[in-house]
């Protein structure tokens, strides 16, 4: 097999398709689907994911212009929303037919000026509303001014108005979320009436689809992490399929005598004779140092092998004293959502960070 001797991240295309269908089953048939493939497709591979899904979804979204350019360069023709475009990249954005989220008066003015300069009559844009996340977007108090400004900008065609729920997975914040939805509804109505337009509206993310599809489904929904099998809720995650498997091989097996130490800073002193396996993955690949010294385990021949000593930049050592294995043998770093969640918890972080931290030097393979 071509990938026997490297650390690889396998992306299960069938699981992606299953998870996409799971979320679609929660929606009305006419609701559009936008898949977020920012941050290298949540650490998987944005190009591979988008190529596989391009005929199955209505939109892709990326965070930055260069991420959108990568998709266009790979031949992706699906509309692409750039969530956080920078003014200095607007020209490139137009060149690659990407659609900007205009979230401030600065971005509006700059983009419109560029369209005038390039003599472009119409260009699709998206408007970001700040309904309570307080990150990007126009706040309610500024909407009358926004409408007045937009009336001057005939070249801007508003494709969608959208916002972002701050705590869609946390049902204790339901009152806050319903307030956000109400604020967004009100603002979207003001803009639509003020400009006599009927743009798409979208607000729901992965956990929003699960918890608020009745209240805020609108015309389109957005999801990213859900595609890979993470529902931000144990019950939902249990119904999704794991799409990512990180695997490697054993480079070398060492016999460590009692009193010898393992790894940098002598992270472990052996209290008996033991065997360790060295695996070619380390903190430069996303296996943080908090996972060393028993913080997590890998699976070898269906048995758990704890990481011993400190995680190195390019390698980890694991305890295989009681495991039948040999050099070149297969190693699973993770192959389930539960394992990623365990690693995230140990690292005092969330699954998103564990996945997006996987180094791009690790080879990605789409499997069917």
Image (cartoon, helix red, strand yellow):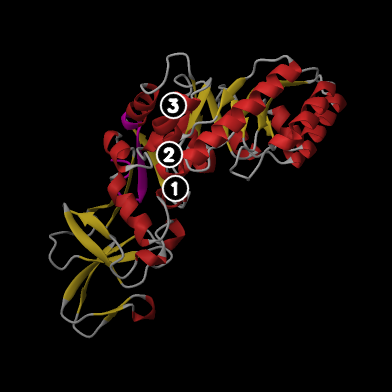
Query: From this viewpoint, is residue 233 visible?
Result: yes
Q: Nearer the viewer, residue 263 or 201?
A: 201
User: Badge 2: few (under 14), some or many (20 or more) residues near its Cα, within 10 Å?
Assistant: many
Q: Please tell me in which quadrant of the rendered image residue 117 appears.
A: top right
Tell me the residue at 26%/60% (across/down). Answer: 297
Please tell me whether mark 2 sits on a helix, a strand or a loop: helix
Q: Earlier in the sequence, mark 3 or mark 1?
A: 3
Q: Which residues are magenta?
A: 1-15
Image location (x, y in percent) of residue 328: 24, 55
Q: State if disc 2 and disc 1 touch (CB < 8 Å).
A: yes
Location of the N terminus by quadrant is top left
Tell me the residue at 69%/38% (across/down). Answer: 139
Image location (x, y in percent) of residue 292: 34, 67
Tell me the residue at 46%/45% (across/down). Answer: 43
Image location (x, y in percent) of residue 204: 50, 31
Mark 3 or 2, closer to the camera: 3
Q: Residue furthest front?
A: 175
Magenta-span inclusion, residue 4: yes
Query: From this viewpoint, is residue 34 visible?
Result: no
Which residue corresponds to mark 2? 225
Please tell me whether mark 3 sits on a helix, a strand or a loop: helix
From mark 3 to mark 1, how far is it between C-alphas?
A: 22 Å
Q: Which mark is residue 213?
A: 3
Which residue corresponds to mark 1? 352
Please tell me whether mark 1 sits on a helix, a strand or a loop: helix
Image location (x, y in percent) of residue 254: 23, 71
Q: Earlier in the sequence, mark 1 or mark 2?
A: 2
Location of the C terminus by quadrant is top left
């Amino acid at each position: 097999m071509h990938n026997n001797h490297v650390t690889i991240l396998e992306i299960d295309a069938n699981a992606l398709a299953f998870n996409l269908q799971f979320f679609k089953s929660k929606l009305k048939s006419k609701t559009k689907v936008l898949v977020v493939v920012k941050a290298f497709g949540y650490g998987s591979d944005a190009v591979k994911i988008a190529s596989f899904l391009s005929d199955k979804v209505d939109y892709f979204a990326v965070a930055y212009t260069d991420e959108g350019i990568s998709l266009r360069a790979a031949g992706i023709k699906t509309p692409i929303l750039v969530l956080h475009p920078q003014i200095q990249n607007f020209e490139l954005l137009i060149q690659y037919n990407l659609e900007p989220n205009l979230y401030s008066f600065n971005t509006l003015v700059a983009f419109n000026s560029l369209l005038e300069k390039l003599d472009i009559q119409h260009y699709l844009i998206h408007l970001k509303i700040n309904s309570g996340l307080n990150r990007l977007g126009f706040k309610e108090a500024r909407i009358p001014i926004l409408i007045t400004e937009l009336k001057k900008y005939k070249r801007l065609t508003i494709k969608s108005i959208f916002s972002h729920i701050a705590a869609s997975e946390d049902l204790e914040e339901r009152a806050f979320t319903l307030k956000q939805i109400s604020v967004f509804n009100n603002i979207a109505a003001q803009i639509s009436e003020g400009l006599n337009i009927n743009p798409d509206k979208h607000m729901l993310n992965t956990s929003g689809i699960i918890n608020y599809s009745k209240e805020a489904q609108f015309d389109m929904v957005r999801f990213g992490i859900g595609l890979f099998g993470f529902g931000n809720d144990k019950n939902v995650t249990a119904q999704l399929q794991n799409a990512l498997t990180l695997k490697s091989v054993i480079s070398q097996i060492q016999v460590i005598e009692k009193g010898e130490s393992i790894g940098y800073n002598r992270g472990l002193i052996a209290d008996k004779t033991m065997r360790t396996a060295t695996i070619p993955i380390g903190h430069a690949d996303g296996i943080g140092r908090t996972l060393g010294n028993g913080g997590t385990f890998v699976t070898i021949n269906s048995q758990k092998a704890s990481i011993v000593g400190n995680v190195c930049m390019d390698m980890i050592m694991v305890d295989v004293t009681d495991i039948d294995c040999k050099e070149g043998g297969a190693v699973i770093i993770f192959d389930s959502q539960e394992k990623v969640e365990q690693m995230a918890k140990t690292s005092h972080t969330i699954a998103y960070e564990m996945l997006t931290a996987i180094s791009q030097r690790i080879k990605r393979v789409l499997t069917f």
